[in-house]
Amino acid sequence: MADDAYALRPMGVVRSSLVRREDAPRQGREGAPDARILLEPAYADALHGIRVGDRLVLVTWLHEADRTVLQVHPRDDLTRPLTGVFATRSSDRPNPLGLHEVTVLGIEGLELVVGPLEAIDGTPVVDIKPVL
């Protein structure tokens, strides 16, 4: 395999009441709060067509992840056998991309109010896609 580098450029950042990984639920539907996505001005035109009520998939860079982890106990339950990270939703993985399905609750200029979102405050947003 080629040793090519790929550049991801954050287009925004998550602003959330969740500030520590250990405070975040495993999935948004497990009690995550609403949050704001603050977009960089260069991406303003990319919001065209997004409406309140839309369902989106946010792709994030899980910046606090341990990229050396290859196996985990699913959901940190030590009674469950070690499992490869590709078979889990663990945030610790070689390329820690997060996928978060959210609903648009509001649009305020370059800010999207979305929920529920389990990503912690400061998480870079690298893409936004509609749920099809």
Image: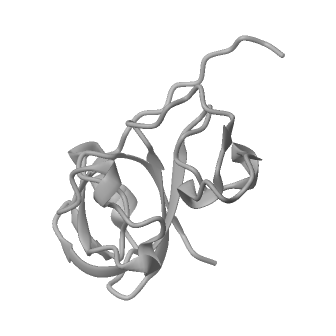
Q: Quadrant of the C terminus?
A: bottom right
Residue closer to the observer: 99 or 29: 29
What residue is rendered at 39% in x and 67% in y? 25
Seen from this angle, which residue lies furthest bottom?
Answer: 53
Picture coordinates of residue 121, whole percent (x, y): 23, 52
Seen from this angle, which residue lies furthest front?
Answer: 79
Picture coordinates of residue 86, whole percent (x, y): 73, 47
Instruction: Judge left or right: residue 58 versus residue 76.
Output: left
Can residue 78 be spotted in the picture? yes
Query: Colour mode?
Result: one colour
Q: Quadrant of the N terminus?
A: top right
| Number of residue marks | 0
Q: Against 60, is 7 above or below?
A: above
What residue is rendered at 29% in x and 59% in y? 23
Seen from this angle, which residue lies furthest top?
Answer: 3
Can residue 102 be spotted in the picture? no
Residue closer to the observer: 43 or 115: 115
Seen from this angle, which residue lies furthest right?
Answer: 1
Q: Against 84, is 52 above or below?
A: below
Q: Against 87, is 71 above or below?
A: above
Instruction: Judge left or right: residue 85 versus residue 1.
Output: left
Picture coordinates of residue 105, whole percent (x, y): 28, 83
Q: Against 64, is 45 above or below?
A: below
Rendered image quadrant of residue 75: bottom right
What residue is rendered at 54% in x and 45% in y? 97
